[in-house]
């Protein structure tokens, strides 16, 4: 394994640049180093103006998502050694399909608004009190939605999804997976309300099942699966609305009616 | 053209463009470009909704004013600094006390990046019929080596189960027993099983549940990625903060009738820590500089099982499920340290389920005896999970397995995990009462940044997540009530804010001739603090350490920034964080020097015994006007549990210890 | 030693203080050519065109059968044209591709739970493949005997 590797990093400062350009830095390769360690090495010792987000360095906060050799990755979980082995360079760019504020920092305010549109909170039909204790939920009921609750909001799926790139109004994989997480939670009764906003072309129906989001997800949330399941549930709901006397059945997805 | 630009009227690209077109005739407007025209409507779409700042920008453009001439200010009733579990819980509490209050959360990162997210093990709350509040309280008080204020502990143990249940009602996916009730597990230092958990990502689920719940409260707005640099104090009352909007570099005062600090701890003062990069003790330094005392800063918790290079946490739950700690001879060495006899299954309060300070101290002794394994990253011992089996590890400890495989190239199902003590938690912090109020009017604190004191000299695992909830709730309520009786700050405060802006510009952004790099000073500080205020401390090392830190503070004045731009200047952010960390490091070492006894996590080799006559008291560190610090002591509130011996490991004699039953 | 920063500015950038211009890269019309996975996705979607080709041919076949023996013979004649054979071979490839990708993706859209756990994807895709092969073999036998 080589003991040095070259990183080509996209740099952009709106105060002096019209558009991003690349700068190369050579960093030592250590067995335990991840791309984030290399970026920190550059910022601490070579060029303090290199700008990027990071926090937990253990793959749980979701701050450090970047494009590494054209693939969306968490840089705190991408080891230098896997690139050094092939004698490759590492190209680091900000996440695709987001506006770039500076260097490797993207603007995710739009993503935050999209999360909110999914109404990701537990909705109950009536205003029940805490004094009644906790809701009961069996391990099996927990298992139904658990996978979709693992999302760390790293937005790698948005960088992978071509629909997000082509249609900025599309709500996107993470927000829809989060909505489906609540729909499938046995304690939730708000599926109908969420579906009213999300069963639209900018919601669930914008997805064409490319499947890239699931492939790049570092937490194996499978947002593509969540969205297809949501589509089927939305269609069933729509068909039911013709047949049942009261129209849409609240909470029909989790079966707690 | 009216100076009012209510963003709610500007919803479409074309209307925004028209507005900017009109502004183009103003003297300022001539600087506008087509790209700014592109930016404004997107800014409205994506950042505009709760954030006052964007429409104020438009306001400036339309009125022909150049921004940055005077310090702009926005105001709120309750301002939270920090968006972790404590901050978000306090925001919800304030919103529920009075829905008419205008509540804002300022955070230097987006809330879901807060360090709460990496907590793994669990949250303790009395849940089972065989458990009682008094037992939880006793475990906490004895675990804290009797330095915990017992009124705070009583309030905490009573409210913790309610808070955890409330979180469940908000959607938190707690693990369950087959009949649907909440499952609990054992944890270090607890004599009964009372730790609620969500797989081994409890903090992650709690934080995301809280964050998603705050989205439905209209009164709560957020300043995402704004860095607070100073608390504004007028006439002994905190009136707001000065903050930098990282995205644009604008420096602005945010006025508030009450401010709640929820900024977390300061693990990054040490070289090996489980803490994220953002834990730089910002809130502690802000409060200290504003005149609030820091309490019990000498008590730093070392978590016994962290990975050697990265410092990543291997949760205590691994030991609670039955992991063994082995030295280089494969021997369960904890049996030599008054922690009981080794049993095949985990026994509460014995061996690997002893309190964290004792386990970390045992490591140091093993190292001196030469029984630890040397690695390129220092001495380690091993955590053995092999006997638990793949099925249990995948069910109860999946994240631990993932972390070991990824960062240590080890599969815990088949191999031993190298671990060492790493800094994990600050028991000390900004001094508060049991309602979260600091001695400074208008300033509240909750979570790790605060010291109530709940955790005393050593925190028990799974007590800090419910602490954030309980005291976040209390501080939110107290701050909301205080705010309803306050007026917003006036011109004196804005003048202070303008001074702060000038200071930031002259000392960092526009300064020439500096020679020091941030990273150099930071590394030296970390090494100094580890050597002088590590697991074991001693007078001469502490004195040397304090001296060195003060020298580093001098050198800090000579810092040079490579990055002079306004836009997302993380180097400026690092420099400011380093300033905060130096203040916190100084307070830690100074407090440690003055406490000449050994208690809990503060162990002095020159004063190895606990001294209840002199030191059954909290150390309070105040900043003097000349920048030096003075230490005062205030007595601990003792109610029902007089100081006794901390006894662990006597499972044969102790009637309360019991073997853990595995919950499937 | 850091590489010297390149000066790429030709004219002063339009920066307004405290209003940084976010860089918005344009997504090219040929976004799907840049990456293997995107290309595979577009081909998968395009395969529906070739499925339609087979459907049309089947409808033409039925129509020819309805119209009598000469129409049927003429249909068979037209099917033996080299360009039509090439089209059919390409279509067969795409229809097989379409089927395989469909069977592989279907389990994530329709999870089946039994005994409190989700069945592995292979157990849902497996029977589909089996049924496909069995039916195809049966039809081939019917036609070729």
Image: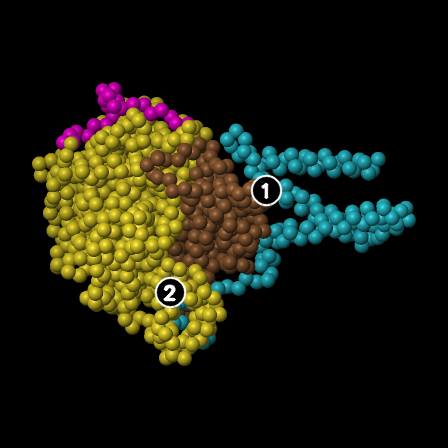
Residue behind mark 1: A243
Residue drawn at x 37%, y 62% is B247
Q: Is residue A58 magenta?
A: no
Q: Position of residue B331 (x, y in %)?
A: 32, 27
Classify mark 1: residues with Cα within 10 Å, few (<14), some (14-19) or many (20+): few
Q: Is residue B649 magenta?
A: yes
Query: In this rendering, would B202 be left or right of B551?
Result: right
- Taking depth in this image into account, of B344 and B639 the one nearest to the observer is B639
Q: Position of residue B562 (x, y in %)?
A: 33, 64
- 2 and 1 marks on the same chain: no
Counting labels gives 2
- Taking depth in this image into account, of B549 and B460 the one nearest to the observer is B460
Is residue B620 depicted above or below B3 in this figure? above
Q: Position of residue C120 (x, y in %)?
A: 56, 35
Tag 2 and tag 1, C-beta contact below 8 Å: no
Chain C representation colour:
cyan
Residue behind mark 2: B54
Q: Chain of mark 1?
A: A
Q: Nearer the viewer, mark 2 or mark 1?
A: 1
Chain shaded yellow:
B
Q: Chain of mark 2?
A: B
Any part of residue C129 in sight: yes
Q: Which label is found at residue A75?
A: none
Give the magenta range: B641-664
Q: Hey, which residue is sitting farthest right in the picture?
A: C70
């Amino acid at each position: 394994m080589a003991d040095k590797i070259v990183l080509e990093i996209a740099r952009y400062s709106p105060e002096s640049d019209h558009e991003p350009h690349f700068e190369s830095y050579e960093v030592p390769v250590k067995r335990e180093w991840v791309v984030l360690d290399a970026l920190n090495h550059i910022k601490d010792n070579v060029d303090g103006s290199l700008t990027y987000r990071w926090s937990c360095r253990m793959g749980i906060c979701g701050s450090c998502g970047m494009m590494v050799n054209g693939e969306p990755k968490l840089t705190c979980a991408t080891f230098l050694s896997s690139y050094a082995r092939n004698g490759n360079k590492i190209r680091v760019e900000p996440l695709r399909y987001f506006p770039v504020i500076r260097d490797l920092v993207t603007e995710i305010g739009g993503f935050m608004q999209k999360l909110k549109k999914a109404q990701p909170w537990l909705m109950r039909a009536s205003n029940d009190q805490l004094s009644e204790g906790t809701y009961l939920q069996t391990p099996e009921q927990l298992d139904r939605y658990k996978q979709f609750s693992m999302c760390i909001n790293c937005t790698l799926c948005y960088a992978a999804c071509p629909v997000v790139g082509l249609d900025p109004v599309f709500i996107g994989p993470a927000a829809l997976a989060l909505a489906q997480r609540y729909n499938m939670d046995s304690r939730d009764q708000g599926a109908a309300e969420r579906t009213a906003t999300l069963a639209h072309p900018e919601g669930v129906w914008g997805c064409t099942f490319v499947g890239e989001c699931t492939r790049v997800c570092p937490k194996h949330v499978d947002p593509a699966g969540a969205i297809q399941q949501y589509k089927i549930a939305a269609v069933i709901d729509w068909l039911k609305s013709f047949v049942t006397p009261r129209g849409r059945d609240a909470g029909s997805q989790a079966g707690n009616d | 053209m009216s100076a009012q630009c209510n963003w709610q009227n500007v919803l479409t690209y074309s209307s925004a463009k028209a507005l900017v077109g009109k502004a183009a005739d103003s003297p300022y407007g001539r600087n506008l470009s087509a790209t700014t025209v592109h930016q404004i409507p997107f800014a409205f779409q994506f950042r505009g909704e709760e954030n006052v700042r964007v429409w104020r920008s438009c306001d400036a453009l339309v009125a022909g004013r150049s921004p940055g001439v005077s310090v702009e200010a926005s105001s709120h009733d309750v301002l939270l600094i920090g968006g972790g579990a404590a901050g978000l819980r306090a925001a919800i509490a304030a919103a529920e006390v009075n829905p008419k209050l205008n509540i804002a959360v300022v955070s230097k990162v987006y809330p879901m990046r807060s360090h709460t997210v990496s907590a793994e093990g669990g949250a303790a709350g009395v849940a089972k019929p065989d458990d009682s509040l008094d037992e939880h309280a006793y475990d906490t008080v004895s675990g804290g080596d009797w330095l915990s204020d017992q009124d705070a502990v009583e309030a905490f143990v009573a409210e913790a189960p309610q808070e955890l249940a409330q979180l469940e009602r908000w959607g938190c996916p707690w693990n369950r027993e087959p009949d649907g009730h909440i499952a609990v597990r054992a944890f270090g230092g607890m004599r009964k099983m009372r730790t609620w958990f969500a797989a081994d990502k409890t903090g992650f689920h709690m934080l995301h549940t809280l964050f998603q719940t705050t989205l439905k409260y209209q009164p709560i707005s957020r300043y995402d990625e704004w860095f607070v640099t100073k608390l504004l104090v007028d006439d002994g009352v905190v009136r707001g903060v000065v903050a930098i909007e990282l995205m644009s570099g604008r420096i602005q005062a945010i006025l508030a009738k009450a401010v709640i600090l929820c900024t977390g701890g300061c693990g990054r003062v040490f070289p090996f820590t489980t803490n994220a990069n953002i834990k730089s003790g910002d809130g502690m330094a802000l409060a200290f500089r504003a005149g609030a005392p820091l309490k019990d800063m000498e008590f730093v918790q070392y978590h016994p099982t962290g990975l050697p290079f990265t410092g990543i946490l291997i949760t205590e739950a691994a030991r609670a499920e039955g992991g063994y700690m082995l030295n280089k001879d494969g021997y369960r060495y904890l049996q030599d340290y008054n922690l009981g006899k080794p049993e095949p299954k985990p026994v509460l309060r014995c061996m690997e389920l002893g309190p964290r300070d004792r386990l970390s101290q045992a490591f140091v002794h093993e190292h001196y005896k030469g029984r630890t394994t040397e690695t390129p990253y220092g001495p380690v011992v091993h955590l053995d999970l092999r006997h638990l089996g793949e099925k249990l590890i995948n069910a109860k400890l999946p994240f631990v397995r993932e972390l070991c495989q990824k960062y240590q190239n080890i599969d815990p199902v088949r191999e031993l995990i190298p671990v060492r003590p790493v800094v994990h938690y600050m028991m000390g912090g900004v001094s508060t009462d049991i309602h979260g109020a600091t001695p400074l009017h208008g300033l509240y604190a909750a979570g790790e940044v605060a010291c109530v004191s709940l955790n005393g000299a050593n925190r028990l695992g799974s007590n800090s997540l419910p602490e954030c909830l309980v005291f976040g709730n209390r501080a939110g309520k107290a701050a909301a009530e205080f705010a309803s009786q306050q007026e917003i700050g006036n011109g004196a405060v804005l003048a202070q804010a303008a001074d702060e802006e000038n200071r930031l510009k002259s000392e960092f952004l526009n300064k020439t001739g500096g020679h020091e790099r941030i990273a150099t000073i930071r590394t030296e500080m970390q090494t100094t603090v580890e050597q002088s205020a590590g697991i074991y401390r001693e007078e001469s090392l502490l004195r040397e350490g304090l001296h060195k830190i003060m020298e580093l503070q001098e050198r800090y004045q000579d810092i040079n920034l490579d990055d002079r731009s306004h836009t997302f200047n993380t180097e400026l952010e690092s420099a400011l964080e380093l300033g905060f960390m130096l203040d916190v490091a100084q307070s830690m070492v100074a407090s440690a020097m003055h406490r000449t006894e050994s208690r809990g996590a503060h162990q002095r080799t020159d004063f190895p015994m606990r001294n209840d006559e002199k030191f059954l008291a909290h150390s309070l560190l105040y900043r003097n006007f000349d920048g030096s610090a003075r230490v005062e002591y205030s007595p601990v509130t003792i109610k029902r549990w007089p100081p006794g011996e901390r006894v662990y490991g006597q499972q044969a004699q102790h009637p309360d210890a019991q073997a853990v039953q595995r919950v499937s | 030693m850091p590489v010297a920063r390149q000066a790429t500015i030709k004219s002063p950038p339009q920066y307004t203080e405290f209003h940084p211009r976010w860089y918005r890269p344009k997504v090219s019309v040929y976004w799907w050519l840049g990456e293997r996975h995107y290309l595979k996705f577009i081909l998968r979607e395009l395969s529906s065109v070739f499925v339609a080709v087979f459907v049309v041919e089947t409808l033409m076949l039925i129509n020819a059968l309805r119209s009598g023996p000469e129409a049927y013979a003429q249909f068979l004649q037209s099917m033996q044209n080299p360009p039509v054979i090439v089209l059919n071979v390409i279509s067969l490839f795409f229809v097989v591709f379409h089927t395989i990708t469909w069977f592989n993706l279907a389990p994530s859209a329709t999870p089946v739970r039994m005994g409190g756990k989700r069945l592995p994807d292979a157990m849902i895709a497996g029977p589909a493949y089996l049924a496909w092969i069995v039916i195809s073999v049966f039809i081939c036998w019917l036609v070729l005997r």
